[in-house]
Image (spheres, rainbow, N blue to C red):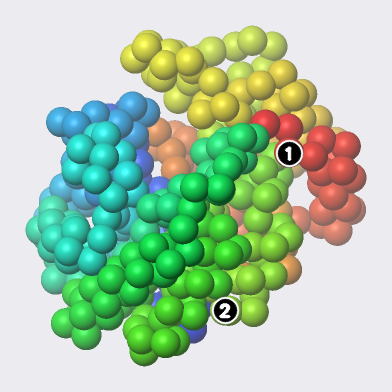
């Protein structure tokens, strides 16, 4: 598998990243370990986690479990030097720290707690899961209201957190740092703060990106290109919408939507499973079939054609799903299919 360097850091990772957010919930520990073994066999050495995982749903009693599962795999396998581990500190959430935002002190504590759970002495990429000041991520863009933000308070927060990140890098606990669910303004300010304090520059930004969700393509892409920041794209299959498994009202047993609904949630894939979203997903599925492609493989391959640095994060509940994803990773996307995806994007812009 090809390898890329995250931003201007010295952290080199596999071109595709294994997501672990279901480890310990939908994916039992033995299967999670088998997935990491399978990923490593094909050169997929980059693995992403977060202190709040597993998700769907997030529970207080399971916070940190996905990191613990990775930690036990690292201890059992002895593969720490063969992989790159990324994790994240949670933004304001009632499930973690009773909703308290992260600051410099909690970042220091969070790093040490993640290191313990991961059973390692270093984290290759440490990310801020979402902004403390508010975010338009997670479908909040439809009613996003930044009027309550205060620039001076935000910059003071960034300075405090950057100081903690700088100390952790100097101590060898972190190799690189990054953002998640950030905006173009936030990315630029974090880069400015790093330069002013001579702290670590943001090497990556983990935001949602798929053929159905392309908010990144304009201002954020421009900021990332000019600041040399790599996109880690999550939900490249639109939380399973692009697999076609929810077509015609289907709700497969064990699927993300079904599990969420069984847990008392709406079962709408975090707001993605809308009439327009299903219609757009069906159109992409039909396009893939016309060209002799599997829609899953098309969606991942398309990411690697984008005019900016991107590492797709693929996640699988089961080994069968992971094997299916892996089977299509080395196939280049033909130009006529790329043009077809561009046409569908114009026909179905931001369908959720």
- Along the line of sight, which residue is nearer the eye, 234 or 32? 234
Q: Is residue 34 left or right of residue 278?
A: left
What's the residue at 55%, 72% (across, down)? 188
Task: Classify mark 2: helix, strand or loop.
Answer: loop
Task: Classify mark 1: helix, strand or loop.
Answer: loop
Q: Label 1 near label 2: C-beta < 8 Å? A: no
What's the residue at 30%, 68% (across, down)? 161
Residue 77, compared with residue 247, is above or below; it is below
Residue 96 is drawn in which quadrant?
Answer: top left
Among numbered discs 2 and 1, the one appearing first in the sequence: 2
Q: Is residue 142 left or right of residue 256?
A: right
Q: Residues within 10 Å of mark 1 (few under 14, many from 20)?
A: some
Query: Residue 109's x, y, as percent?
Result: 14, 60
What's the residue at 36%, 59% (across, down)? 128
- Along the line of sight, which residue is nearer the eye, 7 or 68? 7
Query: Residue 219's x, y, as percent?
Result: 69, 63
Residue 216 makes an appearance in the image: yes
Q: CA distance from mark 2 to mark 1?
A: 26 Å
Residue 95 is drawn in which quadrant?
Answer: top left
Residue corresponding to mark 2:
228
Residue 139, compared with residue 247, is above or below; it is below
What's the residue at 37%, 12% (across, down)? 264
- Along the line of sight, which residue is nearer the eye, 2 or 132? 132
* Circle number at residue 350: 1
């Amino acid at each position: 598998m090809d390898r890329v360097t995250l931003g201007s850091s010295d952290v080199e990772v596999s071109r595709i990243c294994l997501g672990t957010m279901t480890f310990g919930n939908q994916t039992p520990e033995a299967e999670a370990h088998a997935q990491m073994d399978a990923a490593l066999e094909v050169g997929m050495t980059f693995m992403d986690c977060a202190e709040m995982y597993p998700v769907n749903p997030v529970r207080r009693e399971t916070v940190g479990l996905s990191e613990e599962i990775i930690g036990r795999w690292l201890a059992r396998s002895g593969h720490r030097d063969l992989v790159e581990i990324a994790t994240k500190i949670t933004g304001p959430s009632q499930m973690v720290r009773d909703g308290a935002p992260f600051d410099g002190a909690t970042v220091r504590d969070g790093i040490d707690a993640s290191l313990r759970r991961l059973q390692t002495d270093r984290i290759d990429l440490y990310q801020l899961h979402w902004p403390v000041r508010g975010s338009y991520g997670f479908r909040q863009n439809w009613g996003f209201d930044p009027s309550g933000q205060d620039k001076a308070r935000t910059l003071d927060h960034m300075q405090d957190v950057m100081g903690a990140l700088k100390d952790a890098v100097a101590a060898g606990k972190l190799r690189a740092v990054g953002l998640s669910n950030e905006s173009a303004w936030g990315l630029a300010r974090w880069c400015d703060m790093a330069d002013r304090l001579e702290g670590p520059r943001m090497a990556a930004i983990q935001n949602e990106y798929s053929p159905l969700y392309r908010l990144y393509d304009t201002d954020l892409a421009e900021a990332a290109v000019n600041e040399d920041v790599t996109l880690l794209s999550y939900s490249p299959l639109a939380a399973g919408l692009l697999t076609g498994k929810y077509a015609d009202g289907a709700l497969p047993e064990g699927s993300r939507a079904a599990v969420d609904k069984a847990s008392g949630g709406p079962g709408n894939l975090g707001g993605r499973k809308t009439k327009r979203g299903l219609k757009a997903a069906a159109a992409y599925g039909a396009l893939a079939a016309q060209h002799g492609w599997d829609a899953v493989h098309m969606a991942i391959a398309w990411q690697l054609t984008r005019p900016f640095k991107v590492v797709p994060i693929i996640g699988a509940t089961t080994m069968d799903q992971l094997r299916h994803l892996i089977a299509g990773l080395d196939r280049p996307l033909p130009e006529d299919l790329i043009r077809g995806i561009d046409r569908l994007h114009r026909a179905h812009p931001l369908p959720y």
